[in-house]
Image (cartoon, rainbow, N blue to C red):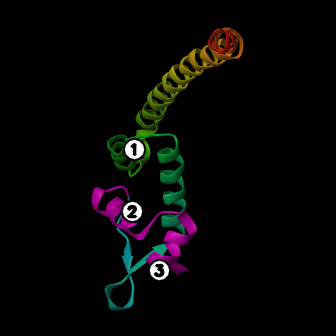
């Protein structure tokens, strides 16, 4: 079985060494094997799991939810609970997207105002100052 040093695992996953250690201490990773001299040795399975953690973190999933998911993932009978957790997070992501889109609409309204009314108000002000 191929194993990877912490530095190799960090390179493959894009996580820093500190983040890998934090995730271990937080209980997001299963027991990491130890190689010669007690050094951590990540397996391909560990790297794949870290890929899933990366995916979920990139969606903004909080560490607390990741911990719940990681604990559930150790038991094959928890598929429904894991699905429910992912569906809840999906609803939270959608709410964030909706809020960002509303903010963007408001911002674009303000930009449009500057392109039309704001620009003409500035021209009017400039003309009145020259007169």
Dot placed on the residue nearer the N-terminal end, 3 or 1: 3
Query: So how many labels did they put on this image?
Result: 3
Q: Is residue 52 left or right of residue 19?
A: right
Give yes or no for residue 18 being in the magenta stretch.
Answer: yes
Between the C-alphas of marks 2 and 1, the distance is: 18 Å
Query: Which of these two is toward me, 79 or 53?
Result: 53
Q: Are marks 2 and 3 in contact (CB under 8 Å)?
A: no
What kind of element bears circle 1? helix
Give the residue at mark 1.
69
For the residues carrying marks 2 and 3, which lies nearer the camera in this image? 2
Which mark, by number, is residue 12? Answer: none
Residue segment shown in magenta: 1-28
Residue at 57%, 68% in the rendered image: 12
Q: Quadrant of the N terminus?
A: bottom right
For the residues carrying marks 2 and 1, which lies nearer the camera in this image? 2
What kind of element bears circle 3? loop
Residue 102 x %, y %? 55, 16
Give yes or no for residue 41 being in the magenta stretch.
Answer: no
Q: Is residue 81 left or right of residue 110?
A: left
Give the residue at mark 2.
19
Q: Quadrant of residue 37?
A: bottom left
Residue at 38%, 91% in the rendered image: 36
Magenta stretch: dominant SS? Answer: helix
What kind of element bears circle 2? helix
Q: Tag 3: Cα neighbours inside 10 Å, few (<14), some, or many (≥20)?
A: some
Between the C-alphas of marks 2 and 3, the distance is: 14 Å
Which mark, by number, is residue 5? Answer: 3
Q: Tag 2: Cα neighbours inside 10 Å, few (<14), some, or many (≥20)?
A: few
Dot placed on the residue nearer the N-terminal end, 2 or 3: 3
């Amino acid at each position: 079985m191929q194993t990877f040093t912490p530095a190799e695992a960090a390179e493959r996953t894009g996580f820093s060494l500190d983040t890998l250690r934090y995730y271990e201490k937080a209980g997001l990773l299963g027991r990491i094997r130890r190689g010669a001299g007690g050094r951590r040795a990540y397996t391909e399975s560990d790297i794949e799991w870290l890929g899933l953690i990366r995916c979920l973190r990139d969606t903004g999933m909080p560490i607390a939810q990741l911990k719940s998911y990681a604990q559930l993932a150790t038991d094959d009978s928890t598929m429904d609970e894991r699905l429910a957790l992912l569906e809840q997070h999906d609803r939270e992501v959608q709410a964030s997207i909706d809020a960002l889109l509303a903010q963007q609409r408001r911002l674009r309204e303000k930009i449009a105002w500057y392109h039309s009314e704001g620009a003409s108000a500035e021209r009017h002000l400039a003309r009145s100052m020259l007169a």
